[in-house]
Amino acid sequence: MIYRSFAKVNLHLEVLGLRPDGYHELRTVFQSVDLCDLVHLQIGGSGVRLEVAGQALPDDERNLAHRAATAFLAAWPVVDGVRITLEKNIPLGGGLGGGSSNAATVLQGLRHLLGVQQSTDVRLEELGRALGADVPFFLTGGLALGSGRGDEILPLPDLPEREIWLVTPALEVSTASVFQELRELTADREVSSMGSLVWGEGVDWEMAARGWNDLQPLVMRRFPEVCRVYNALVEAGARTVRLSGSGATWLALFDDAIESSDLPTALPPDCRVFRARTLNRTSLQRLRVVH
Ligand code: C5P
């Protein structure tokens, strides 16, 4: 079976402070987009065997997809082994959650393939959370609020699907290093229980445009080339230009549909540019299985 493993963007990301466990307390709004990797799953052999095509990534337990399959087989030892092939398109270290998405797709794909009961939802979420803070979102998808480490997920009513441009400068930003740098800045800030921007019923794209990302100023200061891409997108007329996660991908929303030829030539030539669409949960269900 082949499954699509979709990327996400953060429409909003607030850092409320440092938690006793060393992670940061977040209020973030995730949105699924149609940029995706493909995950091939085949039952057979013994243990987990992983192949990666399209990007230079480890094919052992350093890869989150590998760890997800190991965790699944430990929880439901109904077969001896599984073979996974990842076809990678989502840029690495870009704030689009590619690795976490792959892990969630492996968990959901194995459940589907092996006919494990839907009532395993809670257990699957626990496995996901143990793999990484972004994984639980990918088990839900669509539009969702993430709190805690970003791993406590509350699905929000989906927004109408729309075009969204994703521009990834040619550099990888390490999430851990961005949070490390932020640590000193947030150490003395109190952790409150509510984000200051309230998302809930009645969120629309107008409201989404009023969100922000607390990591953005820090990443812009540290990487001038990331800053240049921001300026170019603003000049091209984008209404909203926002960093996704810890970057370095910019999401850009334009008022009208545009063509890639309308995008500024000032964008550095080594940027990757994706004309994507947001996905609601109904579309995710429909598109999840390739065949
Ligand atoms: O969850 P993940 O392992 O992808 O996060 C990478 C790193 O980012 C963590 O090890 C941690 O240092 C930092 N992080 C954080 N607060 C969060 C999420 C991640 O400090 N809410």
Image (tube, grey):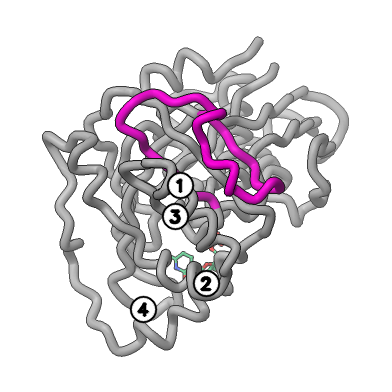
Mark 3 and mark 1: span between their CA atoms? Answer: 12 Å
Numbered disc 4: secondary structure: strand
Task: First in sequence, mark 3 or 4: give its number.
Answer: 4
Which residue in the structure is indicated by mark 2? 178
Which residue in the structure is indicated by mark 3? 243
* Occupied quadrant, residue 192: bottom left
Which residue in the structure is indicated by mark 4? 18
Mark 4 and mark 1: span between their CA atoms? Answer: 32 Å
Disc 4: residue Cβ within 8 A of ligand 1's nearest atom: yes
Residue reaching furthest to the left: 202
* Residue 151 shows in this picture: yes
Q: Give the range drawn in magenta.
A: 249-275
Say which of marks 4 and 1 sits in front.
1
Say which of marks 3 and 4 sits in front.
3
Task: First in sequence, mark 2 or 3: give its number.
Answer: 2
**Rendered-image quadrant of the C terminus:** top right
Amino acid tagged 4: Leu
Mark 2 and mark 3: span between their CA atoms? Answer: 13 Å
Amino acid tagged 2: Val
Residue at 37% x, 41% y is: 237
Residue at 68% x, 39% y is: 73
Numbered disc 3: secondary structure: strand
Task: First in sequence, mark 4 or 2: give its number.
Answer: 4
195 or 129: nearer the viewer: 195
Up/down of 177 relative to 268, above or below? below
Are the two marked residues, 2 and 1, in contact with CB atoms closer than 8 angstroms? no
Say which of marks 4 and 2 sits in front.
2
Task: First in sequence, mark 4 or 1: give its number.
Answer: 4
Density class for disc 3 (Cα within 10 Å; few <14, some 14-19, many ≥20) is many
Numbered disc 2: secondary structure: helix
Amino acid tagged 3: Leu
Residue at 68% x, 40% y is: 69
